[in-house]
């Protein structure tokens, strides 16, 4: 073995023993347990990937799609990243922010993963970011848009393969202002994803002369929409902008139609409203227009190959979440390949990831200085079981990364 590699191996082993002893000490209230270090991250071992995703609750399907996409990319590389086999660890985060620190700590301290891939829910993401920063663990966010992760809480080890909450909202703000809408009501779950989507929407919409006349919300993951739908109708806006996703989005779109508003008040949203949900929404979703960084019918070669392989592998049509999982793996591959799988070489991994041009099914993208994708936002329209691309609403949109000092 090369001398430097050997030194790194010994160093990494020593570190993992120290970490283990420290956590054992914590767990036993001060009495150290005799333990051997697990086969770890050092040169020669496997690349250890920890999925922290929702596998139950309203976002369960989103978590599974992310994992599917990630695994498919690795499979396409012969099951390896940086020339090493990949070993997976999994935690169900239940979209519960209160459990986030403990769940992230399990993956990092107990399983000693090289990278955490998680999560979907913005509130849970805040907990993961904190723990990843404390432990200097590589983190790839495959969905959650929480602006802080690539804003004031940005860090060298924090990457995102998805979007910031601000981005799709901002894109839709432009679209509605350009259509001459003046008076819009917003309706979301009351947590970061909804609130920050509305903020992005409002920023673009009001800069072009529109006005958000009322911001309505209900707690996550409640689906008792009736009273709020009635209130929207009484306000008679030009349009409504909403953020809902997963199981909640299915219910909302159906309730909206059942209330008789589908042909009365134009309903718009970030694309999560109709992504991965169309089979369940059926007729209620037809014609809905949304903005997102992915769409059906993009017809680039990368997307075509991705969709074929996904459908063959999982007997399912891919959605935006599968794309984000796939791209999280591509981003990690850029880092792992640069160091030939030696995951102890963090600065080199980070440098390679920062420089990556990700050949995504959504269209190729690069990362901003804050590690968030700079990407096109498409205007899409539901047609049958597809979110068909209409136009590019905003080209190469970069999150402003307010408060990030990197
Ligand atoms: C979020 O909580 O950031 C979130 C969840 C589901 C989505 C999009 C964003 O589809």
Image (cartoon, rainbow, N blue to C red):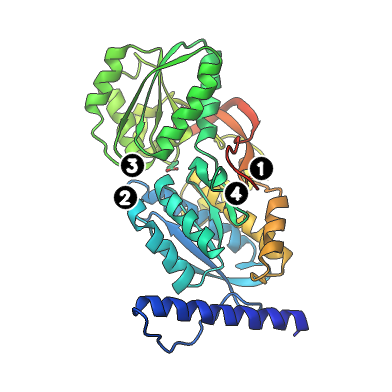
Q: Could you say whether the residue bearing mark 3 is in a helix, strand or loop?
A: helix
Nearer the observer: mark 4 or 2; the answer is 2
State if disc 3 and disc 4 touch (CB < 8 Å): no
Q: How many marks?
A: 4
**Does the beta carbon of the residue at mark 4 sit less than 8 Å from ligand 1?**
no
Which label number is shown at residue 30? none
Looking at marks 1 and 4 on the same chain, the residue that comes earlier in the sequence is marked by 4
State if disc 1 and disc 3 touch (CB < 8 Å): no
- Alpha carbon separation for disc pair 2 and 1: 32 Å
Of residues 128 and 393, the one nearer the viewer is: 128
Query: Which residue is at a point 73% across and 51% down the rendered structure image?
Result: 355
Which label number is shown at residue 368? 1
Query: Which residue is at a point 51% across and 60% down the rendered structure image?
Result: 132
Label 3 packing within 10 angstroms: few (<14), some (14-19), many (20+): many
Q: Could you say whether the residue bearing mark 2 is in a helix, strand or loop?
A: loop
Q: Residue 47 sits in which quadrant?
A: bottom right
Nearer the observer: mark 1 or 4; the answer is 1
Q: Could you say where residue 311 lies in the image, as x and y percent from the top left? A: 51, 50
Q: Would you name the residue on which mark 4 appears?
A: 306
Of residues 398 and 274, the one nearer the viewer is: 398
Q: Would you name the residue on which mark 2 appears?
A: 57
Q: Would you name the residue on which mark 3 appears?
A: 247
Looking at marks 2 and 1 on the same chain, the residue that comes earlier in the sequence is marked by 2
Residue 273 appears anywhere in the view: no
Quadrant occupied by the N terminus? bottom right
Whether 377 is drawn above or below 67: the answer is: above
Q: Could you say where residue 236 lies in the image, as x and y percent from the top left? A: 33, 11
Query: Which residue is at a point 54% across and 48% down the rendered structure image?
Result: 153
Q: Residue 282 sits in which quadrant?
A: top left
């Amino acid at each position: 073995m090369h001398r430097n590699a050997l030194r790194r191996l010994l160093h990494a082993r020593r570190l993992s023993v120290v970490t283990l002893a420290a956590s054992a000490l914590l767990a036993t209230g001060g009495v150290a347990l005799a333990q051997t270090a697990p086969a770890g991250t050092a040169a020669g071992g496997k690349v250890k990937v920890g999925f922290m995703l929702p596998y139950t609750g309203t976002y369960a399907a989103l978590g599974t799609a992310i994992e599917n996409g990630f695994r498919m990319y690795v499979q396409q590389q012969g099951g390896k990243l940086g020339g090493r086999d990949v070993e997976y660890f999994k935690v169900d985060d239940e979209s519960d922010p209160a459990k986030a620190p403990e769940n992230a700590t399990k993956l990092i301290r107990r399983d000693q993963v090289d990278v955490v891939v998680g999560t979907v829910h913005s509130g849970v993401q805040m907990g993961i970011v904190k723990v990843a920063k404390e432990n200097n663990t590589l983190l790839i966010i495959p969905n959650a848009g929480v602006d802080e992760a690539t804003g004031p809480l940005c860090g060298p080890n924090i990457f995102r393969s998805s979007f910031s909450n601000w981005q799709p909202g901002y894109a839709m703000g432009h679209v509605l202002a350009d259509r001459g809408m003046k008076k819009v009501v917003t309706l979301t779950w009351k947590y970061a994803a909804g609130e920050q989507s509305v903020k992005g929407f409002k920023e673009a919409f009001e800069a072009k002369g529109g006005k958000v006349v009322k911001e309505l919300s209900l707690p996550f993951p409640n689906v008792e929409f009736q009273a709020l739908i009635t209130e929207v109708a009484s306000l008679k806006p030009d349009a409504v902008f909403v953020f809902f996703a997963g199981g909640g989005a299915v219910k909302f779109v159906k309730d909206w139609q059942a209330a008789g508003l589908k042909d009365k008040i134009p309903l718009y949203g970030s694309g999560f409203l109709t992504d991965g949900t169309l089979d369940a929404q059926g007729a209620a979703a037809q014609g809905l227009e949304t903005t997102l960084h992915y769409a059906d019918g993009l017809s680039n070669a990368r997307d075509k190959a991705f969709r074929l392989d996904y459908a063959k592998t999982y007997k399912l049509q891919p959605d935006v979440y599968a794309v984000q999982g796939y791209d999280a793996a591509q981003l990690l591959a850029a880092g792992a390949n640069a160091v030939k799988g030696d995951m102890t070489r963090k600065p080199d991994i980070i440098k390679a990831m920062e420089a990556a041009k990700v050949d995504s099914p959504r269209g190729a993208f690069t990362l901003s200085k804050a590690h968030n994708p700079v990407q096109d936002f498409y205007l899409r329209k539901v047609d049958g079981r597809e979110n068909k691309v209409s136009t590019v609403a905003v080209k190469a949109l970069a999150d402003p990364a307010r408060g990030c000092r990197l």
